[in-house]
Amino acid sequence: MSDNELGNIFTIGFTQKSAETFFNLLRKHNVLTLLDVRLNNISQLSGFAKQQDLIYFLKELCNVEYIHILDWAPTKEMLSAYQKKEISWEIYEDKFLNLLAKRNIERDVTPEILTDSCLLCSEHKPHNCHRRLVVEYLKKISGLNLSIKHLI
């Protein structure tokens, strides 16, 4: 893919979605790879999106590959401070973007891993979610002409 070609990158949260809705959205948008950017992907609270179940469902229902990318998740301390309202969204966003830069997350990113991929987190909407920050950061840093679409 050349720099001026347009590709799609998606984001999705699993909360407030049935398994049927979740997997139908991935199929409808021809997602090839699900990039799990959750800090904790093995929680019983994840339901159908618990890592081992999700890997199975993605392959069997959608023929979608699964990759967990922990470097694209916040630290436990950072997430906890935001969830407990000890820091505002603006402070969290600034800290998280600095963390992404410090981790140099773009070093292993290729057009192939981003194009027609979908970043997964738990938040229903992308507005105050780190998956939106990751995808916007990667688009800016990579220089790829990616179209970001949030699946809700």
Image: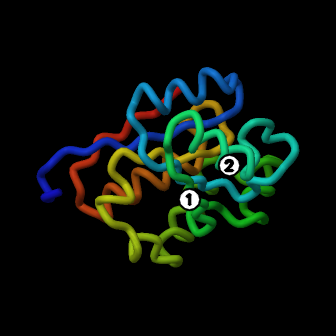
**What residue sits right under mark 2 in the picture?**
88
Q: Is residue 95 above or below residue 26?
A: below
At label 2, which amino acid type do we have? Ser
Q: Depth-wise, is mark 1 or mark 2 nearer the camera?
A: 1
Question: Residue drawn 80% across and 56% down?
Answer: 80
Q: Residues within 10 Å of mark 1 (few under 14, many from 20)?
A: some
- Camera-nearest residue between 36 and 144: 36
Query: Which residue carries the number 1 mark?
Result: 67
Image coordinates of residue 66 in percent, x first then y, are 56, 53
Quadrant for the C terminus, please.
top right
| The label number, if any, that marks residue 28 in the structure image | none
Residue projecting furthest to the right: 44
**What amino acid is at disc 1?**
Ile
- Location of residue 18 by image quarter: top right
At which x and y percent is residue 150? Answer: 46, 33
- Position of residue 26 relative to residue 145, above or below, is above
Q: Is residue 151 left or right of residue 82?
A: left
Instruction: Please give the name of the residue rendered at 55% of the width and 60% of the height, measured from the top-left corner.
Output: 94
Residue at image location 46% in from the left, 71% down from the top: 105
Q: Quadrant of the N terminus?
A: bottom left
Residue found 42% across the figure and 40% down from its top: 31
